[in-house]
Image (cartoon, helix red, strand yellow):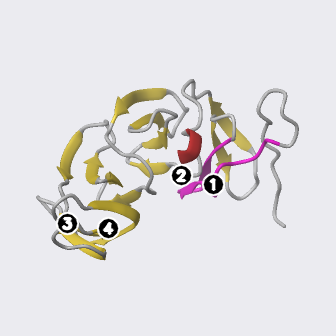
Amino acid sequence: ELWRLALPDVAGILGSGGALSGGVVAGEYLYVVSVPGDLYKINAATGDVIWKADNEYGPAGSLGHLPPAAVGDVVIVPRKSVGSASAFTQADGQLVWSESVEFAVDPFLVMDDAVFMAAGKIVAIDATGNTFWSIGGFRDGGFAYGSFNGKDGVIYVEGVGGRSNPGSWVFAFRVPGS
C-alpha cells in the first residue's frame, strides 16, 4: 500500500464515505468524486489532497459510480440530474460551467480533447461545455449503452438495434473533422 485517504461520510450515515469510482489520473494527480459528491484533486504519488471542490449538485445519484473525465484544463463530473455535468478547473477546482449535455448512464470516453457520453444518443462536448457533435436514432429506435472505446477519430459503442434490426450491436462512428 502506497497511501490511504479517508473521504467523508454522507452527513449522519456512518460508513457511507469513500469515492464513487477509481477516479481519473491526469498528469501527477488523481481526481475522485466522494460519496457526498465533492471533487478532490489528490497527489497520486503521496495521497495529499491539493484541493476539494464543493459540488453543490452532489453525485449523480445512480450515476454516481461514473468517474470524472479530464479534458483540456478541466475535470468534468456527472451531476445528480440525469443529462447534466459540471466542469471544474484542474488548477484550483473552480466551477467553470454546469450544463445539460444529454447523457445518462454510460462512462465517459475522452478522445481528441473531447468527452463523449451516451444514453440513446451519443454526445461529444469540449472543455468549455459546448456540444459540438451528436448522433442518435440508432436503427429504428435502438439506443447506445455500455462502454465506449475510440481511436483516430472513430468511436465504438455497444447498442441495441431497433425494430427492424433487433439484438445487440457494436456501432462505429467517425467523428466529423477528425
Residue 159's mark?
4
Q: Give the residue type that dot 2 points to.
A: Leu
Label 1: which secondary element: loop
Q: Which of marks 3 and 1 is nearer the N terminus?
A: 1
Horizontal arrangement in the rendering, residue 162 relative to residue 55 (left or right): left
Mark positioned earlier in the residue sequence (3 or 2): 2
Instruction: Give the CA distance from mark 2 to mark 4.
Output: 19 Å
Q: Which numbered disc, 1 or 2, marks the residue that appears first in the sequence?
A: 1
Of residues 27 and 170, the one nearer the viewer is: 170
Mark 4 touches mark 3? (CB < 8 Å): no
User: CB under 8 Å between callouts 1 and 2?
Assistant: yes
Q: In which quarter of the image is the N terminus?
A: bottom right
CA gap, disc 1 to disc 2? 6 Å
In magenta, the rendered stretch is 16-34
SS at circle 4: strand
| Labelled disc at residue 43 | none
Q: Mark 2 points at which residue?
A: 66
Spatial CA distance of label 4 from label 1 is 24 Å
Would you identify the image quadrant in which residue 9 lies? top right
Q: In which quarter of the image is the C terminus?
A: bottom left
What kind of residue is marked 3?
Arg
- As drawn, the label of residue 21 is 1
Q: Mark 3 to mark 1: distance in Å?
A: 35 Å
The residue mark sitting in front, 3 or 1, is 3
Asked if disc 3 and disc 1 are in contact, CB closer than 8 Å, the reply is no
Going by the picture, which residue comes out furthest to the left? 177
Give the mark toward the camera: 2 or 4: 4
Question: Distance from label 3 to label 2 (Cα)?
Answer: 30 Å
Looking at the picture, tell me which residue is in the foreground, 36 or 62. Answer: 62
> Is label 2 in contact with label 4 (beta carbons under 8 Å)?
no
Q: Is residue 91 left or right of residue 165?
A: right
